[in-house]
Amino acid sequence: MSGADGKWTLSVPPGKYEVVLDESTLPENVGLQGAAGPSRSLEVFEGAMRNVLFPLGPVGANAPPPESEPTMLDRLPNLVYTGVHIGLILALGALGVSLIFGTMGLTNFAHGELITFGALTAFIFNSTVGLPLWLALVLAVVVGGAFGWLQDRFFWGWLRKRRTGLVGMMIVSIGLAMVLRYIFLFQFRGDTRQYADYAAQPGVEIGPLLIAPKNLIMDLVAILVLIAVSFALLKTRLGKATRAVSTNPALAAASGIDVDKIIRLIWTIGGALAALSGVMLGMFQGVNFQMGFQILLLVFAAVTLGGLGTAFGALLGSMVVGVVTQVSTLWVPTELKNVSALVALIIILLIRPQGILGRRERIG
């Protein structure tokens, strides 16, 4: 039985369920809308919450005239914008992955947990401490950068000094990712939660687009941050030193560059960018313990597509992945949209193995 607000909650063990709406219990002149029918099939996982929605509305003489189904051309502009929005979120995470790979050669499978760490940190500051979300975001970025610095100072730097191989470090990163993920699960449980601010906003019509104001602000922040990091890589001494370490660490060290210091700074920047990506992703879809892990494959796809170790390739690859995943829902089920990005990745790498902006390398 639903409450006065029409909502109901039922605790069930994990498994597959079919939820059926008894239409005879609905108020007079109220009926089920749409063609989906009165039943919904879903799977419930351990520690997770699933929502079941039934669109209701007036029937009979009071029913509104039926609306025509939106055409493919009607949906396309909003799908493209959503793809660009997701691409900017991915770009923030992918840039950190690309910088770390470029300077260390490490494929860091724990980078998804840096994204989750940023989102959960902002959730604590916003929903637990009670700070406004914009301030929680700033603090989460600072804490995320500090977390990246601490990781390299007391963990990755120690492994480098012991001359641990890249394959060994990659396997260590997988273990670290699992440890962090289950720490997050233990502390925050498996529910998906929303920030206290801006959880729901009415959309604003801009031409054919319907956009929530928070998404526009997020896009502007992401663009400004990406421009600032790109400018720093191109025009500052730090950027030149980073590119020197990425090209040839031994020669950079011989030229007087402190390679360890540059790598540590890259971890700090990567942690801060991942935290910002996590907060924005949390504003878009909610916060849970495995949100970074869930998009890690798309982040890797973006980095590989753009060209491993190239910052601008990561940006371009992220935009391609974001748009392809969303636009593909015009033809494929939503559950398979990520497959479309991977298919695009395979096709492009068959034509250009080094990625869109990657450099050719001689092997052997």
Image: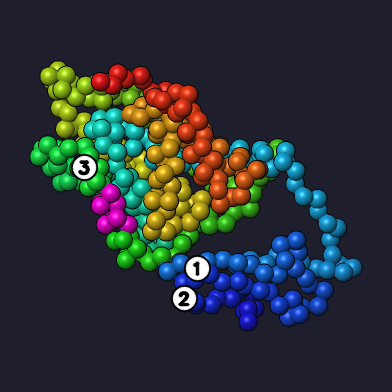
Magenta span has 301? no
What are the residue bounds of the magenta stretch? 174-181
Alpha carbons under labels 1 and 2: distance apart: 8 Å
- Check the image and report above or below for 268 versus 175: above
Residue type, numbered disc 3 = Met
Element under disc 2: loop
> Which one is in front, 4 or 176?
176
The residue beneath circle 1 is 44
Count of labels in the image: 3
Snapshot quadrant of residue 200: bottom right
- Check the image and report above or below for 340 versus 193: above
> Which one is in front, 159 or 218?
159
Q: Residue 7 placed where, x, y %?
A: 61, 73
Residue type, numbered disc 1 = Val
Q: Are marks 1 and 2 in contact (CB under 8 Å)?
A: yes
Alpha carbons under labels 3 and 1: distance apart: 35 Å
User: Earlier along the polypeptide chain: callout 3 or callout 2?
Assistant: 2
User: Earlier along the polypeptide chain: callout 3 or callout 1?
Assistant: 1
Residue 13 numbered tag:
2
